[in-house]
Each structure stands twice: as structure tokens, then as C-alpha cells.
Amino acid sequence: MQSITIETLVAAPTEKAWDYYTLPEHITQWNFADSAWHCPTAENDLRVGGKYKARMEAKDGSFGFDFEATYTDVETHKKIGYVLEDGRKVEILFQPEDESTHVKVIFDTEDQNSLELQKNGWQAILDNYARYTESN
């Protein structure tokens, strides 16, 4: 299994970047790769052994799925690790940089979609997160 790294620099202090990444009321505002999609619900029990669940759906109702994971590592304002239902691992790192926060996501790939499609999709979601965080 390969892993892919994506990253962004968010013009927000780390505490805000963390909250906007982890609180369900914010997750539902940015957790989609394309404007034809949305994230109507999100649940987040942010602790080791806790569960994360986000519903991702096409706005026209043609397709949807639940993105679910179990947390394996939580260091507030620094690091989040989780395992997806299919066993793939994801790590998110938050690094302060002056008045901004560098957010890096490292995720194991799956074998249904091309590496480029996976990287572009995850990066689009991360870019949405950065735009939302900076504009609120």
C-alpha cells in the first residue's frame, strides 16, 4: 500500500485551524471535493478509540457514502491519527508557522481509483477546509 501526502498553509492560528478541522459544525461546511457535493452530517468523538463519521453526498442525491474512522492518536493542536474501516491509515499534522498553520495529511491509498484522482480529491477537500477556515 502506498501513501500520499497533501498539505496546505492556513492563514489562522493553530487553535482555530484545529477547531475548524475537528468540530462537526465546521466539518459539514468544507468536507467535500467539489461544489456538486456536500457533507450534510458529521460526528466526531476526538479521542483514541473514538469514532469519526461524515456523510458525503452528491447534492442531486445520485450518490453518497459514509466516511468512517477510528482514532488511534490524538495530540491536541498537533496530531491526529485514525484508521479507516478498510484498514488504511491517515495522519494529520498541525504545525504553527507565524500567524498561520501548516496542515499536512498523509493517507494510505486504496486501489479502486488512480493515485492522481485520490491525491486531487483529498487536496480539493483540504483546500476547501483552508478557504472556509480563513473566511470565517
Image (spheres, helix red, strand yellow):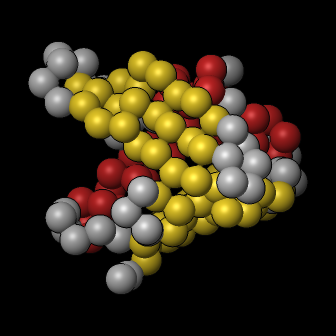
Q: Nearer the viewer, residue 17 or 66?
A: 66
Q: Residue at x 51, y 68 (%)?
A: 89
Left or right: residue 74 versus residue 50 is: right
Q: Nearer the viewer, residue 127 or 82?
A: 82
Query: Where in the figure is residue 74, as x and y percent of width and height?
Result: 77, 57
Query: Where in the figure is residue 116, as x and y percent of width and height?
Result: 25, 67
Q: Looking at the picture, does residue 13 appear above or below residue 136? A: below
Q: Residue at x 29, y 27 (%)?
A: 57
Report the residue that reaches farthest toward the left: 62
Q: Which quadrant holds the N terminus? A: bottom left
Q: Which quadrant holds the C terminus? A: top right
Q: Nearer the viewer, residue 46 or 5?
A: 46
Query: Where in the figure is residue 62, as x and y percent of width and height?
Result: 13, 24
Q: Nearer the viewer, residue 7 or 87?
A: 87
Report the residue that reaches farthest toward the bottom: 1
> Can you see residue 50?
yes
Left or right: residue 133 versus residue 116 is: right
Left or right: residue 94 versus residue 83 is: right
Q: Looking at the picture, does residue 10 appear above or below residue 81? A: above
Q: Residue at x 36, y 24 (%)?
A: 38
Q: Looking at the picture, does residue 5 appear above or below residue 35? A: below
Query: Where in the figure is residue 26, as x and y percent of width and height?
Result: 62, 25
Residue 109, located in which quarter of the rendered image? Answer: bottom left
